[in-house]
C-alpha cells in the first residue's frame, strides 16, 4: 500500500498506515548516528553487571530494570510509557470490550464491598447474587478493607474458573455462600442513549475501545427508529482510546471525500491521510459534540473532524490537547511499551497537542489545574490562542492549533452549587453511601418503579429527601450548614436521584436524570432549536 501523505486512502486502512515499524526507525537512527546496536547493548550490559556484582547492597537487577524503563520513556514525551505485564492485562481488558469476571458493579463503603448492579445474564446473576449484597470474602480471603484495584484483581480471573463468595444479605441473619463461575463480562463504551427531546437523541461515549463503533451505531440506529433527526454526542470525560474508532464514527456523519485526520511521523511510512467514503448513515442529520478539559486523543480526533469540516457544532470548554499517536510494542515478558510514533492533524492542518517541552513534564501535568486558577473554565476570554497557529475550516471559520479543541459555543462551568459543604460530602463519598443505604432500606418500594420516569414521580418529596441526607451526613461527621446546603441542594438532590436510578436500572438510567439542567446540554439543545447546527456551519452563524 502506498502511504504517501498526498494519496487519499480509505479510512479502513488507517491501522496499517499508522502502524509504522519501530525496528526500522531504530535501525535508521543508529545508522545515521554511525553506531551499531551492539555498542549500546554492551554498554547497558556492562552497567547492569557492575551494579549486580559490585554495588554495596544486593540488588534485584530485574526490579531495577522495571523501575528504569518508565524513567527512560518519561524523557521522551508525556504519552510514551511502559506497562508491566499486569498493567498491560488490565489496560487491554478495559479497551477490549470484555473481560473475564463475576459480572457486578460495586462500591466500597466503610471498607465493605457493596454490589450496586448485577449485569443481566452475567455470572453473578446466574449464581444468585443480587444488588445490595455485601461480599465479605472470596475463596476464603477477606475483602474487607482492601483497595478497589486489589478487589478487582481478586474477582477477575480466567474464564470458567470458580470463585467462592461469602455474602451478607439484609434478609438473612447468617452469611450466604455462592460459587460463581467466571465468564465474559462486557465493558460498555456507550453509557447512555436516549431521546432527550422530540427529534433529538443523546449518546454518551466514555471511551474508544474495540466495541465502541458497534455500540455507537447500535445506539444511533435505535434513536433514529425512535424519531431522532439530530444527535448530541457527549464526549465529556472521554480520554480516548483507539484512533480507528473515532475515524469510523466521524465517517458516519461526513459526505464523501472529506479529510478526517492525517498523521505525520519521523519517516514517510508514518504519514497518512484518511478520507470519508460517503457511506455514512447519518450524513444528513444535525450533530453537536460536547467536550470538556478531559476529552482527549480520539475524542479530539472525532471533534476535530466534525468542526473542521463544518459538519456540526462543538459545545463545552477547551479539550485536553493530546495530538500524539502511540503504537504498542509487546516485549517478551508480556509487558509492553506504548511509544509515540507520529503526530495527528485535524482536517484544517492543525496539531492540537499542547506544549510539553517549554516548561517540562511537571508543568504539562499541572496544566489542567492552571486552567482553573487562570479562570479559563469560567470565561472564554481567558483562553489563550496562538495567532501563529491559526487555521481555517472548510468554509472559512477560524480555528487554532497548539492546545486542544476550542469549542464553537463555550459554556462556562457553573460553580454556584460547589460550596464548601458540597466539597466536604464529595470528598467523604457521603452521597454514594447515603444512596446505598436508601436503596437497601426501600428496595421493595422502589422496585415498583418500572423506569427512571416512574422513579422520579415516586421521589417527588425533595425536602424530605434532602433532610434525610443532611441527617445522614451529620451522622458521618459532616455537620449541617444550611446556608451552603441551600446553595447546593439542587445538585445534591439531582445526584442522589440519578444514583438511585443507576442502582435500580443500570448506568443508562443515570444520565436522563443527571443531565437535567446541565448547562452544556442545555446550550446544545438551544443551538438545535435555533438551527445553528445545520450543515454547513458558516462564520458568524452561531
Image: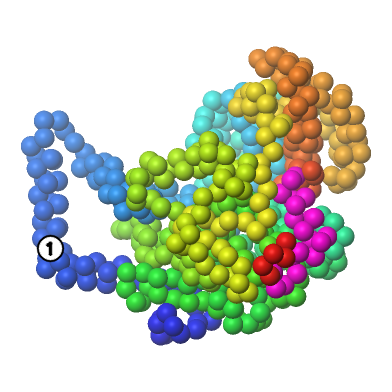
Side of 424 where 4 appears, left or right: left
Quadrant occupied by the C terminus? bottom right
Residue 41 in view, yes or no? yes
In this figure, which residue is indicated by the disc labeled 1? 38
**Residue nearer the viewer, 179 or 304:** 304
**Residue nearer the viewer, 78 or 144:** 78
Q: Where's residue 463, x and y in %?
A: 87, 25
**Residue nearer the viewer, 250 or 13:** 250
Badge 1 element = helix
Whether 36 is drawn above or below 7: the answer is above
Whether 529 is drawn above or below 44: the answer is below
- Residue at point 32%, 73% (across, down): 267
Residue 476 in view, yes or no? no
Q: Where's residue 312, x and y in %?
A: 69, 66
Whether 133 is drawn above or below 47: the answer is above
Give the quarter of the image for residue 504.
Answer: top right
Residue segment shown in magenta: 518-537
**Residue nearer the viewer, 87 or 220:** 220
Q: Where's residue 173, x and y in %?
A: 74, 22
Q: Where's residue 219, x and y in %?
A: 73, 63
Quadrant occupied by the N terminus? bottom left
- Residue at point 59%, 82% (across, down): 257
How many numbered marks does the figure carry? 1
- Residue at point 15%, 66% (across, down): 33
Q: Is residue 473 magenta?
A: no
Sort mark 1 into few (<14), some (14-19) or many (20+) by Cα contacts within 10 Å.
few
Whether 300 is drawn above or below 421: the answer is below
- Residue at point 65%, 58% (across, down): 408
Colour basis? rainbow
Q: Is residue 521 magenta?
A: yes
Amino acid at each position: 500500500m502506498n502511504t504517501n501523505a498526498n494519496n487519499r486512502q480509505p479510512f479502513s486502512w488507517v491501522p496499517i498506515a499508522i502502524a509504522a515499524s519501530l525496528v526500522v526507525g531504530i535501525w535508521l537512527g543508529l545508522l545515521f548516528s554511525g553506531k551499531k546496536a551492539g555498542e549500546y547493548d554492551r554498554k547497558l550490559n556492562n552497567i547492569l553487571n557492575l551494579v549486580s556484582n559490585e554495588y554495596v547492597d544486593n540488588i534485584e537487577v530485574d526490579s531495577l530494570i522495571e523501575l528504569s524503563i518508565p524513567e527512560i520513556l518519561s524523557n521522551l514525551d508525556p504519552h510514551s510509557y511502559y506497562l508491566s505485564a499486569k498493567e498491560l492485562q488490565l489496560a487491554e481488558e478495559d479497551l477490549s470490550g470484555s473481560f473475564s469476571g463475576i459480572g457486578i458493579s460495586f462500591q466500597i463503603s466503610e471498607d465493605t464491598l457493596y454490589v450496586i448492579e448485577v449485569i443481566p445474564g452475567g455470572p453473578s446473576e446466574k449464581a444468585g447474587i443480587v444488588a445490595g449484597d455485601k461480599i465479605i470474602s472470596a475463596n476464603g480471603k477477606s475483602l474487607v478493607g482492601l483497595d478497589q484495584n486489589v478487589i478487582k484483581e481478586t474477582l477477575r480471573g480466567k474464564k470458567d474458573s470458580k470463585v467462592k463468595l461469602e455474602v451478607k444479605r439484609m434478609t438473612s441473619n447468617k452469611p450466604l455462600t455462592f460459587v460463581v463461575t467466571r465468564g465474559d463480562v462486557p465493558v460498555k463504551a456507550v453509557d447512555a442513549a436516549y431521546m432527550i427531546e422530540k427529534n433529538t437523541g443523546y449518546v454518551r461515549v466514555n471511551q474508544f475501545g474495540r466495541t465502541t463503533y458497534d455500540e455507537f451505531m447500535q445506539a444511533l440506529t435505535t434513536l433514529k427508529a425512535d424519531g431522532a433527526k439530530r444527535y448530541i454526542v457527549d464526549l465529556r470525560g472521554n480520554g480516548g482510546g483507539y484512533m480507528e474508532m473515532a475515524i469510523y464514527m466521524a465517517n458516519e456523519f461526513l459526505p464523501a471525500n472529506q479529510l478526517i485526520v492525517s498523521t505525520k511521523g519521523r519517516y514517510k511510512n508514518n504519514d497518512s491521510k484518511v478520507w470519508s467514503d460517503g457511506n455514512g448513515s447519518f450524513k444528513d442529520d444535525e450533530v453537536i459534540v460536547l467536550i470538556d478539559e478531559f476529552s482527549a486523543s480520539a475524542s479530539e480526533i472525532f471533534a476535530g473532524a466534525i468542526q473542521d469540516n463544518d459538519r456540526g457544532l462543538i459545545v463545552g470548554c477547551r479539550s485536553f490537547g493530546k495530538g500524539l499517536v502511540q503504537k504498542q510494542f509487546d516485549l517478551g515478558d508480556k509487558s509492553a511499551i506504548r511509544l509515540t510514533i507520529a503526530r495527528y492533524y485535524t482536517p484544517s492542518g492543525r496539531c492540537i497537542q499542547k506544549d510539553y517541552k517549554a516548561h517540562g513534564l511537571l508543568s504539562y501535568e499541572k496544566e489542567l489545574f492552571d486552567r482553573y486558577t487562570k479562570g479559563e473554565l469560567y470565561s472564554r476570554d481567558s483562553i489563550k490562542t496562538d495567532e501563529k497557529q491559526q487555521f481555517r475550516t472548510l468554509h472559512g471559520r477560524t480555528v487554532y492549533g497548539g492546545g486542544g479543541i476550542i469549542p464553537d459555543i463555550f459554556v462556562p462551568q457553573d460553580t454556584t452549587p460547589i460550596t464548601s459543604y458540597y466539597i466536604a460530602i464529595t470528598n467523604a463519598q457521603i452521597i454514594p453511601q447515603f444512596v446505598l443505604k436508601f436503596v437497601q432500606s426501600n428496595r421493595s418500594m422502589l422496585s415498583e418503579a418500572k423506569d427512571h420516569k416512574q422513579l422520579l414521580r415516586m421521589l417527588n418529596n425533595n425536602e424530605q429527601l434532602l433532610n434525610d441526607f443532611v441527617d445522614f451526613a451529620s451522622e458521618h461527621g459532616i455537620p449541617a450548614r444550611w446556608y451552603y446546603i441551600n446553595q447546593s441542594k439542587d445538585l445534591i438532590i439531582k445526584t442522589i436521584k440519578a444514583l438511585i436510578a443507576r442502582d435500580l436500572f443500570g448506568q443508562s438510567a443515570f444520565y436522563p436524570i443527571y443531565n437535567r439542567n446541565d448547562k452544556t446540554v442545555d446550550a446544545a439543545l438551544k443551538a438545535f432549536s435555533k438551527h445553528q447546527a445545520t450543515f454547513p456551519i458558516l462564520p458568524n452563524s452561531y
